[in-house]
Amino acid sequence: MKAKASFTLTLFLVFFVFVHIKAGDDAMINDLPIQYEELTATDFPVALKKASKTCLIPMGIMEKHGPHLPIGTDLINIRAIALAAAEREYVVVFPPYFVGQIFEAKHQPGTIAYSHELIWNFLQETCDELARNGFEKILLVNGHGGNNRFLDYFCQAQLEKERDYVVYLYREPQDEAFEKKIQQKQKSGFDYHGGELETSLMMAHRPELVRLNFVTKESGQDQHRLDNLSNVWTGIWWYARFPNHYAGDASPANADLGKMILEHRVQLLAKTIKQVKSDQKTSQLQKAFFEKSKTPRRKK
Ligand SMILES: [Zn+2]
């Protein structure tokens, strides 16, 4: 009888400890920070697993945004979108990243325009370091238009040599129905930089950073200074058209419009995070490609 009682007690204890550890693990997984810099070394392997080895880098820049928005607008907006999306679909979000292409704003106060070598190497080494720490998927989510061409080429160049990770570049899908809804609410004609939409987005989550009373200090209208050319492109095109580094009219901006845009963009990004986390094909194809590239003439 005694032996049976102690056996039952042992069983109970083992069960109790197991449940306790399991509950502790669940609590740890549920409470995991999203932001890379907030993870402890103990959290790190758990976060890697929960994120399916995926790290998201929201990319911003330091550049003027008209007379009324903060210099870090792209960084602040894209991080808000990325963090909200990661709340819905867990992924580790890299610390504030503002190294990118912005030569065209060097004439304006506050621009941090690193050399093209540094911009490239910084991103490549960031990806390498993330991979060294166990991330196999890196999702670049760009918030700055001036980075677009650079990032396309950067991602294409990932095939230059064999790597044990995949760099995904997020391309926000077009949604005609949503765009129509926005157009019905939008009062300004166009919005390329610091205009009604971008300002509204900032007003939706950081209204204290928007100085709408400065909006009329400068013009965001197209100056059309290179209209003599139609079929060529030069790096000076943006300065030719928008020398104030402001393109649009932010005066009708409002938080309600911004909230619609924010929610829409968060939803879309969360969907993509989920897709990337479960994707196995890209890495398989990349591996096969590198393997075949070593001996392209041998048939397999
Ligand atoms: Zn911007």
Image: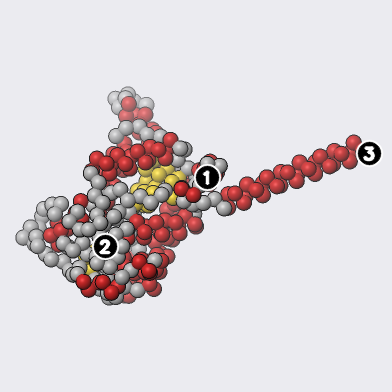
Give the SS element for disc 1: loop
* Residue type at numbered disc 3: Met
Say what secondary structure mark 3 lies in.
loop
Task: Judge by depth and name the residue closer to the eye, 166 or 275.
Answer: 166
Q: Give residue 23's position: percent from left, percent from top.
A: 67, 49
Given the current orientation, which residue lies at the most extreme left position? 228
Query: What amino acid type should be assigned to the residue bearing mark 1?
Result: Thr
Vertical relation: 7 (above or below) 19: above
Q: Nearer the viewer, mark 2 or mark 3?
A: 2
Badge 2 local density, few (<14 within 10 Å), some, or many (20+)? many
- Please give the label number shown on residue 1: 3
* Type of amino acid under label 2: His
- Residue at (18%, 63%) from the top-left corner? 244
Residue 246 position, x and y percent, is: 22, 64
Left or right of 139 on screen, residue 27: right
Question: How many angstroms separate mark 2 from mark 3 (CA)?
Answer: 80 Å
Q: Which mark is residue 115?
A: none
Q: Is residue 68 left or right of residue 227?
A: right
Query: Where residue 124 sits: x, y (%)?
Result: 33, 39
Tell me which label, 3 or 1, sits earlier in the chain: 3
Labelled disc at residue 40:
1
Of callouts 2 and 1, which one flags the residue occurring earlier in the amino acid sequence? 1
